[in-house]
Image (tube, helix red, strand yellow):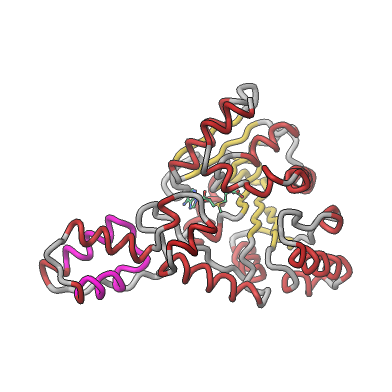
Amino acid sequence: MRTEFRCKMEPLFSGYYANMLNNRLSLRHFFLRNAAIFTELNLRNKRVLDVGAGFGMKLVCLSLMGIQEGVGIERDSDMMNGFLDLVSLFERLNIKPVKGDIHDHDFGLTAFDAIILENAISHIGDTEALLERLNRILSPTGVLYISDDNNNLFPLSFVSRWKSRKEAESGTEDMLRAARSREVDRTPFRDLRAEMIHEKFPQVDQQTLNMLVKGTRGMTSNQVKEAVGEYVAHGERPRKSAFPYRNPVTGEFAEKGFDPLNLARVLEKSGFKCRILRPPDFYLKSANPGLPKHQQVAASFLLWAMKYAPDRAVPFMYPSFSIVATRL
Ligand SMILES: C[S@@+](CC[C@H](N)C(=O)[O-])C[C@H]1O[C@@H](n2cnc3c(N)ncnc32)[C@H](O)[C@@H]1O
C-alpha cells in the first residue's frame, strides 16, 4: 500500500510531510495532536468540515477516531489530487474531498457540527467574509476550531514571516528550492508575474515591465493580465492590492499574521464564546520532534513556561495559537 501511495503522491506529499515520513516521533506527534483535538472538541459521531484541508490527513486521522462524516475543502489542485488519492486508500471512511474555494462553495445552512481550520486562516485573503460564511454553515450548537502558526502576539513571529514573504516575493530560486517541493512555489512571485506580462505583452519595454511587475503585487494571473491590459490601452497604472503577497499562478496568499485576542473579539461579536487553548500536555514530552535540536529546546522551554503561566499571558508565549469558539 505504501509503495502505491508514494508513487502517486511524490514529490509534493513527501515534501510537505517530510518530517512525519522521516521521523517516527513526528508521526506520533501528529496523531496525538489530532487525538487531543478530537477530545477537546468532542467530535465523536460529529459532522466535521476541514477548511483548507490540504491532503486530508487530518480527516483520515479524525475519521479513524470516530467522527461521523468528514468533509475537506481545498482550493489547490495538486493538494486535492493528493487528497483524492489518499481517500481512495480508505474507502470505508466517510470522507468527502471538495475541490474549491470556501468563499464560493455553498454547503447549506448549519451543515456541520464542527469546523476546523488548521494553518488555513492565515492563507485565506478575506477573514471577515470567511467568518461570515463559517457562521452560516456551522450548526447552532457547533464548535469552531482555529489553530495557526502565525501568532502576531509572539514577537519573533514578525521576523520569520517578514523573511518568508520577502523570499516568496523576490527571493532567489535557490532559497525557495530548499523550502518548497513544487516548481510553482519555488519561483519568486515577482518572476512569475514578469513572465506572465512578458508573454502576453511582449511589446512592453524593460523599464515599464519593472514598474508593472511591482504594481501588480498581490494579484492573480487574471488580475495581472487585466491590470496590464488597462495600462497598455489607457495608460492607467495598476491599483495597489490590499494584501501584496500572493502567488499569481496558484492564487494562494502568503501567510498573514493574527492577533488571537483580536480574532477572539471578532468572533465574540458574532455570537461566539472563545477560549484560547494551552498546548496539550504531551507537547511537553515531544515538542516538535521534527525541528532541529536547538529549536526543540527553545520550544520545550516556552511550552513548559506556558503550562504554569496565568491565562492572560498564554497568547503571547508561543508562535502558534489555538482558539475554540462555541455559540453563547
Ligand atoms: C498551510 S496549508 C494547511 C493544510 C492543512 N490544513 C494542514 O494543516 O496540513 C493551507 C491550505 O489552505 C488552502 N486554502 C487557502 N485558501 C483557501 C480557500 N479560500 N478555500 C479553500 N482552501 C484554501 C491552501 O490551498 C492550502 O492547502
Q: Is residue 73 magenta?
A: no
Quadrant of residue 43 in the image? top right
Residue 96 drawn at (x, y percent): 55, 32
Find residue 237 and report its horizontal and vertical position in percent: 21, 74
- Residue 70 in picture, x, y percent from top left: 62, 35
Q: Is residue 51 left or right of residue 286?
A: left
Which stretch appears magenta?
208-230
- Seen from the viewer's position, the closer of residues 326 and 308 is 308
Residue at 45% across, 65% down: 168
Task: Tell me if residue 212 can be seen.
Answer: yes
Nearest the viewer among 66 and 250 is: 250
Residue 227 falls within the magenta-colored stretch: yes
**Figure label count:** 0
The residue lying furthest to the right in this view is 308
Which quadrant, please, contains the N terminus?
A: top right
Quarter assignment of residue 53: top right
Q: Position of residue 72 (x, y in %)?
A: 56, 39
Image side of residue 176 versus residue 227, left or right: right
